[in-house]
Image (tube, helix red, strand yellow):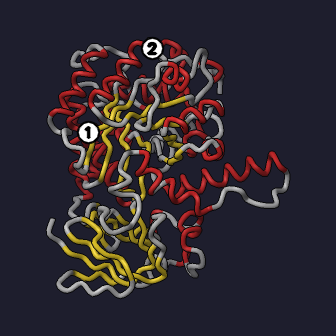
């Protein structure tokens, strides 16, 4: 990489248990890594960026995003989970072509970077062919973001001619693992996103064992509504398949026992509060997961319904948990969940959940330079009295001035770097128009809602809106 940067004079939030925050300090970046931190560093020949009046902190980590849904922005503003499944998973997903997926993933990843997200888990369950997988992966690489490309094993409602069987999907994942995603040190790494475990258990077991064979992290939707039979966690626990490589998503209907099982296994949970609250999945599991000792992270989930920034996710998760405590206890004398506890969920805890804790998630010498600069001199952050609390409760995506990933500026002083935004916008609009035209337009999206039982066990959640 070759660049040396001295980031001077910022108020530094390290999010690292062994590195104290600095009211005013410098960070020296060389060859993509942090090599020194402290007040008034002397670094010799390097490029200096004056960050006086700014906040410097680790890049945020989105632990769950369906990036391919970027062209569908706000179409689901009033959708329940049944509406979402009918419109997006049954109707729209099969209509995406590889070029649509590339446009979607590129725009979505750039949106994340613009909002201070340096790492995301792309839960890519729109893989209709090897070409789809390649296009989605290429877009992540093109964007400059750090990502876990979680190859989605879920099949669409109609049989794919290119990937007609579960076994063919496993084989295509092996293709990527042996070629483009062979390295575990690349900026984009491989993961596996499981099919919802309402298929025959033999298929779920094969998918889990496939991920273990490939040596990649696993992520899975889990207990997002009440269903009949054993839970996903129960099934995996019964066969010894839980582990620290599994990131469960939602878990709003998980029992306390299931959460303890996840904690004991070293696994993690990704809470997506905005989606869960809107779609009727139940209350976010944030507090119960923390009390069970589960490593807890946050995700934006779907911009087809809600926003794509983690500042909103932190606030919602925190305040919903506080509201539930008030409801239970009356007028609480103490707020048990502290604001500053939310910041690790989108930094170091998320990095640890993805197996990246030695690489990113906090600011310390030796880690990659994944960091963001916030305008602490903006009116909504002035005066800056309690920096960590202010980031959680008062900052927003518009405060993100600069973003660095592996020592490279992805956004600098308010603008994305080396990005033709006009072309990105044009292509994602074209993708939206093409996909909607293939399904008969927006008015056709919710047709077939009554047929969801053919694809999912909706259990107790299958109630009319």
Q: Which residue is mark 1?
A: 136
- x and y percent of residue 416 in the render? 29, 64
* Label 2 packing within 10 angstroms: few (<14), some (14-19), many (20+): few
Q: On residue 85, which mark appears?
A: none
Dot 2: what SS? helix
Q: Nearer the viewer, residue 343 or 438?
A: 343
Residue 369's spot in the image, x, y percent?
A: 30, 65
For this rendering, which residue is in front, 70 or 143? 143
Q: Nearer the viewer, mark 2 or mark 1?
A: 2
Q: Is residue 163 visible from the viewing direction of this image?
A: yes
Residue furthest toward the right? Answer: 330
Query: Which quadrant of the view contains residue 293?
Result: top right
Which residue lies at the image location 53% right of the left edge and 26% below the top edge? 233
Q: Which residue is mark 2?
A: 201
Q: 109 or 11, which lies in front?
A: 11
Mark 2 to mark 1: distance in Å?
28 Å
Left or right side of 132 for 276? right
Q: Residues within 10 Å of mark 1 (few under 14, many from 20)?
A: many
Q: Relative to 419, is 105 above or below?
A: above
Residue 85 x, y percent position in the rendering: 49, 27
Q: Residue at x 60, y 52 (%)?
A: 316
Task: Say which quadrant the C terminus sits in.
Answer: top right
Q: Look at the image and tell me whether residue 433 can be seen.
A: no
In the rendered view, would you say 125 is above or below 170?
Answer: below
Residue at x 20%, y 43% (from the top left corner): 183
Looking at marks 2 and 1 on the same chain, the residue that comes earlier in the sequence is marked by 1
Looking at the picture, how far across and down is residue 296, in whole percent?
A: 53, 46
């Amino acid at each position: 990489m070759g660049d040396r940067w001295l980031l001077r004079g910022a108020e530094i939030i390290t999010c690292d248990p062994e590195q104290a925050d600095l009211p005013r300090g410098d960070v020296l970046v060389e060859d993509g890594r942090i090599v020194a931190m402290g007040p008034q560093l002397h670094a010799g020949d390097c490029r200096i960026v004056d960050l006086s009046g700014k906040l410097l902190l680790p890049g945020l980590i989105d632990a769950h995003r369906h990036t391919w849904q970027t062209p569908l922005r706000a179409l689901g503003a009033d959708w329940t989970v049944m509406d979402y499944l009918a419109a997006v998973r049954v109707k729209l997903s099969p209509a995406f072509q590889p070029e649509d997926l590339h446009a979607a993933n590129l725009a979505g990843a750039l949106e994340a970077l613009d909002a201070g997200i340096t790492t995301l888990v792309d839960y890519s369950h729109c893989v209709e062919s090897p070409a789809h997988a390649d296009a989605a992966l290429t877009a992540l690489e093109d964007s400059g973001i750090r990502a876990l490309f979680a190859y989605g094993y879920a099949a669409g409602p109609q049989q794919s001619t290119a990937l007609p069987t579960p076994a063919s999907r496993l084989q295509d994942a092996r293709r990527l693992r042996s070629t483009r995603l062979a390295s575990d040190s690349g900026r984009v790494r491989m993961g596996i996103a499981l099919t919802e475990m309402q298929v025959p258990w033999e298929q779920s077991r094969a998918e889990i064992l496939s991920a273990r064979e490939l040596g990649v992290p696993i992520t899975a939707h889990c207990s997002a509504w009440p269903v009949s039979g054993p839970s996903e966690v129960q099934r995996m626990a019964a066969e010894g398949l839980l582990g620290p490589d599994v990131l469960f998503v939602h878990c709003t209907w998980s029992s306390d026992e299931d959460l303890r099982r996840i904690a004991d296994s070293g696994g993690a949970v990704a809470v997506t509060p905005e989606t869960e609250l809107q779609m009727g999945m139940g209350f976010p599991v944030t507090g119960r997961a923390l009390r069970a000792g589960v490593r807890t992270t946050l995700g934006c989930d779907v911009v087809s319904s809600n926003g794509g920034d983690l500042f909103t996710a932190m606030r919602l998760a925190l305040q919903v948990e506080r509201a539930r405590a008030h409801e239970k206890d009356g007028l609480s004398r103490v707020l048990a969940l502290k604001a500053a506890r939310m910041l690790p969920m989108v930094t170091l805890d998320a990095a640890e959940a993805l197996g990246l804790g030695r690489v990113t998630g906090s600011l310390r010498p030796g880690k990659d330079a994944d960091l963001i600069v916030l305008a602490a001199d903006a009116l909504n952050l002035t005066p800056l009295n309690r920096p960590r609390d202010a980031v959680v409760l008062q900052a927003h995506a518009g405060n993100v001035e600069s973003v660095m990933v592996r020592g490279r500026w992805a956004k600098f002083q308010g603008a994305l770097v080396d990005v033709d935004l006009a072309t990105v916008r044009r292509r994602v609009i074209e993708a939206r128009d093409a996909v909607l035209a293939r399904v008969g337009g927006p008015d056709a999206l919710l047709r077939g809602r009554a047929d969801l039982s053919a694809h999912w066990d909706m259990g107790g959640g299958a109630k009319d809106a």
